[in-house]
Image: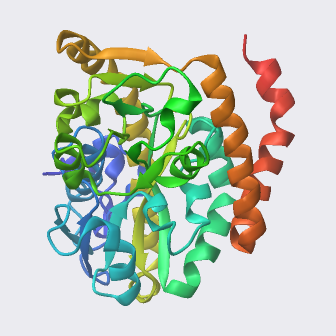
Amino acid sequence: MRIPRRCRARNGVTIAAALGLGATLAVLPASAQSTKLKLQAGFQLNQPVLGEMIAHFRDTVEATGRSDIRLRLYDATRLVPTLQIFDAVSAGNLDGGFAWPGYWMGKLPATTVFAAVPFGPEAPEFLAWMYEGGGLELWRKLYAPHDVVPIPCGVLPPEASGWFRKPIEKPEDLKGLKIRYAGLGGKVLEKLGASITMLAAGDIFVALERGVLDATEYSMPAADRSLGFYKVAKHYYFPGWHQPASIMELTIHKPTWDGMTSQQRAFLESTCRDTTLWSLTRGLAVQAEALEFFEAEGVTIHEWPAPIMERFRSAAAEVMTEAAASDPAFAEAWDSLQAFRARNATWNRLARP
């Protein structure tokens, strides 16, 4: 993208504010140290919101015209399977990845606290803890032994609760069901007797179509629509108690991060903040159309009955207590988030009608 001449500052520095991105996205002189980053997306780049968010990050970097950071962004699964991105970045086989931190909970259970918490905070409060309440420092502490640096780089509004072949009328209906569920929400459903598996996006539809799965959750209505679940499961449940907000991450191999200039690191973090705002507003804006589409396709949209929601809530409390007891890093992050929310509880109550 060409930068207008009047927006060029002295000494070769281009002000990205000319692009509406703010002065923090300044382009460095051409003589600055050059960094090339090989990144892999965790979602298909054409997928609504999820993939668009990653493309927005790339396009914002490229739009500034800076020459000292160059991205080579690969679509999901092009180099490694999505669920192996963290390991690939840790080993230095990728310079970075763009995904959801809850995917690594098998390796690092505490990642789920930074990804999405059942009955937890929605996006504004989650980000406040992350940036102002010590969350990001704990997240980076968790990843440091693995040579991975996380950067919050997107946040999603509440998800849907999932697609089911048959309606769920009471908690006992969940027993024995084979369900794809990610993160801590899957642990909650296990307590109610469901059999939980974790599959990457591209594998879910076939498993649902063939009856390998009885139900699945994935994301928001707009993203779910792109994967076609409505064709084989006609019962769509809300609210997404398991993920009231979901934080996405850009991860960078630590030796690569350490080799960058402070200006380059600040640029990536600032671009991720821009992407976070974009993803939230985009995510809120495109769901109504998807819901209208589903209704036209014969999907029945349900709200969970109160007795089932109460079972979800009580089971979630058990899951969090058990996870904290079994993993010190989880306990540290969970205690920090709870303390932050407790301090702000009065404000949250008084500030809203």
> Relative to 219, is 26 above or below?
below
Q: Position of residue 281 (x, y in %)?
A: 40, 30
Nearest to the observer: residue 78 or residue 134: 78
Give percent across and percent down for residue 28: 33, 70
Looking at the picture, tell me which residue is in the foreground, 95 or 184: 184
Residue 210, percent from left and from top: 17, 45
71 versus 352 height, above or below = below
Left or right of 164? Residue 335 is right
* Nearest the eye: 115 or 216: 216
Picture coordinates of residue 118, whole percent (x, y):
61, 42
Q: In which image quadrant can residue 288 be found? A: top left
Q: Please identify the quadrant where the C terminus is shown.
A: top right
Q: Residue at x 64, y 76 (%)?
A: 141
- Residue 333 visible in rendering: no
Q: Residue at x 31, y 84 (%)?
A: 33
Q: Is residue 204 above or below residue 251?
A: above
Residue pictured at 55% horizontal, 77% vertical:
143
